[in-house]
């Protein structure tokens, strides 16, 4: 009955709308469009229930609040629907959290096995915002019985190490910030191919690219369909998704005395690399020390008594942590930041980022990579080049309970292995970067305010530092235009039932 009535009203409104369209001004028309949309929404059909939503969320306090905010924006749109017509929403820090779903691959098997009656899988990030009625309309254009992969495409500027030097012309990969979709038949095929011995899943560096590569299957699989309605920047009026938070606003930045920066270097780089640090971001803080195997009073460097090693720096990193927690000058400082001598970082932005996190917890924050996560036997770790952030408590735990197998073991991976043993997840932040700006797609960087990049190779570190000073942001510290307050809106979530 209700649906017949609303059809009539719909037709009526449409007629009026068409009649006035040529005569009235835009805002007026928008109102009509708005009301049509609402009427459509009232039709309580089941098409949204054909979609399974999966948001990539995290358990750490700040991110858990952002997940609540996501859940609230989602639930507010579906609460009027009959229970059986509501779509499923899963948050990755609550569901299948221990199997590394951040690498995306484990989801394929779960989706294929558990949801054979569903049509679509929608995957997005904690800050993605979705207009569900519009999404429903969008999907009516696609045939979910076919192998479909829908997204906002990212394109590399050049072959890059973070994508295993894959040819950027071959295929595009999705931006999860805009959300992307897989149809059930495609998911089923992808899951059936796992484990695929011809496809390396041992290292996870950038899951969105790795998944697209797997789906592309050397040209024998599926290319992503570019869908302009999946957006990060409200590029057009048809946008179904958006990504409003370029950088978190967690209030006042942490104070100068609340963090300590340790720079790892060695004699070979005292001159060129350390001088870059001293001429750029090193000037932003007094709380910085340089650690080497050779004392150099001109910098000055501190000799930790650990022999220099060519590859891994586990010995050095652990010695830094031990010194940090035992030296009376630093032992009470809430945060320890460990960087390489070729890390390029904005301390000003770092202070804003740190304000989001609770230093009284055991926290390890950085850019998350994975080793053998997909096969289930591995672990996640923070890749060191973009900077590693540890709470004081975390540094204490590492110093006490995470011995290095050898001084030259890879420090970031050993720490990841210890985190797994401790049962403490890596807290991923998209603002720290293991590689150079050129290694990331322009569109990906366009929806964030980066805090760090890494490496001097074929890259002007001064230019990168300049980019961290001004890009996407005016000079005034008080100008909050780019920052959305991300502390409060999660807190008022009414804690809907766990979906
Ligand atoms: C949808 O795709 C399936 C499988 O290719 C096909 O059999 C069916 O006819 C298509 N439906 C429409 C409405 O195009």
Image: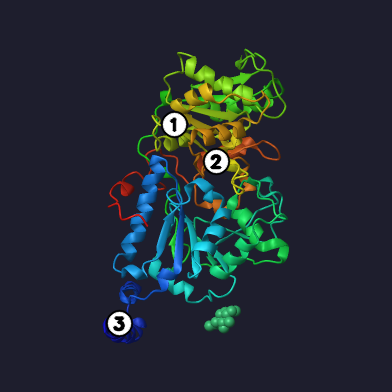
User: Where does residue 220 sit, x and y in percent of width and height?
Assistant: 71, 67
Q: Residue at x 31, y 55 (%)?
A: 497
Q: Which residue is mark 1?
A: 362
Judged left or right of residue 174, residue 86 is left
Judged left or right of residue 458, residue 346 is left
Residue in front for this viewpoint, 325 or 119: 119
Q: SS class of the residue under badge 1?
A: loop
Q: Residue at x 52, y 56 (%)?
A: 176
2 or 3: mark nearer the eye: 3
**Mark sitting on residue 367:** 2
Q: Residue at x 44, y 33 (%)?
A: 351
Judged left or right of residue 310, residue 47 is left
**Mark sitting on residue 3:** 3
Residue in front for this viewpoint, 15 or 91: 91
**Figure quadrant of the C terminus:** bottom left
Q: Which class describes the residues within 10 Å of circle 2: few (<14), some (14-19), or many (20+)?
A: many
Quarter of the rendering containing residue 304: top right
* Disc with the residue nearer the chain's start (2 vs 3): 3
Alpha carbons under labels 2 and 3: distance apart: 49 Å
* Disc with the residue nearer the chain's start (1 vs 3): 3
Alpha carbons under labels 1 and 3: distance apart: 54 Å
**Figure quadrant of the N terminus:** bottom left
The image shows residue 91, relative to residue 254, as above or below, that is: below
Q: Residue at x 30, y 51 (%)?
A: 493
Q: Is residue 187 visible?
A: yes
Q: SS class of the residue under badge 3?
A: helix
Quarter of the rendering containing residue 89: bottom left
Q: How is the image coloured?
A: rainbow
């Amino acid at each position: 009955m209700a649906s017949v009535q609303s059809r009539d009203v719909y037709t009526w409104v449409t007629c009026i709308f068409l009649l006035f369209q040529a005569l009235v001004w835009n805002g007026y028309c928008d109102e009509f469009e708005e009301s049509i949309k609402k009427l459509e929404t009232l039709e309580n059909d089941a098409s949204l229930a054909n979609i399974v939503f999966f948001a990539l969320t995290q358990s750490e306090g700040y991110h858990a609040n952002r997940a609540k905010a996501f859940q609230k924006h989602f639930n507010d749109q579906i609460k009027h629907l009959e229970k059986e017509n509501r779509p499923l929403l899963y948050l990755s820090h609550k569901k299948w959290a221990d199997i590394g779903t951040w690498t995306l691959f484990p989801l394929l098997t779960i989706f294929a096995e558990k949801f054979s009656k569903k049509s679509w899988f929608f995957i997005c990030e904690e800050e993605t915002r979705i207009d569900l009625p519009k999404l429903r309309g969008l999907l009516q254009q696609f045939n979910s019985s076919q192998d479909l992969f829908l997204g906002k495409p990212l394109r590399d500027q050049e072959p890059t190490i973070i994508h295993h030097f894959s040819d950027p012309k071959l295929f595009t990969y999705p931006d999860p910030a805009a959300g992307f979709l897989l149809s059930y038949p495609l998911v089923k095929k992808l899951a059936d191919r796992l484990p695929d011995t011809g496809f390396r899943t041992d290292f996870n560096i950038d899951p969105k690219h790795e998944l697209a590569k797997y789906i592309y299957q050397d040209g024998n699989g599926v290319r992503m369909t570019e869908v302009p309605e999946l957006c990060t920047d409200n590029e057009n009026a048809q946008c179904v998704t958006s990504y409003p938070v370029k950088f978190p606003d967690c209030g006042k930045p942490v104070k100068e005395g609340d963090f300590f920066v340790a720079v790892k270097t060695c004699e070979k780089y005292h001159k060129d690399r350390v001088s870059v640090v001293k001429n750029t971001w090193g000037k932003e803080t007094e709380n910085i020390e340089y650690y080497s195997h050779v004392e150099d009073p001109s910098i000055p460097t501190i000799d930790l008594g650990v022999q220099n090693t060519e590859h891994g720096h586990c010995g050095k990193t652990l010695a830094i942590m031990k010194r940090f927690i035992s030296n009376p000058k630093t032992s009470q400082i809430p945060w320890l930041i460990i960087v390489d001598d070729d890390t390029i970082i904005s301390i000003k932005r770092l202070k804003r980022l740190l304000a989001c996190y609770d230093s009284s917890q055991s926290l390890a924050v950085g850019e998350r990579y994975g080793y053998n996560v997909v096969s289930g036997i591995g672990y996640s770790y923070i890749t060191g080049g973009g900077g590693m952030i540890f709470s004081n408590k975390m540094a204490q735990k590492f110093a006490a309970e995470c011995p290095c197998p050898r001084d030259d073991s890879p420090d970031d991976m050993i720490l990841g292995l210890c985190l797994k043993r401790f049962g403490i997840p890596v807290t991923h932040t998209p603002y720290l970067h293991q590689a150079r700006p050129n290694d990331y797609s322009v569109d990906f960087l366009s929806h964030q305010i980066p805090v760090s990049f890494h490496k001097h190779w074929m890259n002007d570190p001064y230019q990168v530092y300049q980019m961290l000073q001004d890009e996407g942001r005016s000079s005034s510290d008080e100008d909050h235009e780019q920052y959305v307050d991300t502390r409060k809106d999660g807190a008022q979530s009414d804690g809907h039932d766990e979906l």
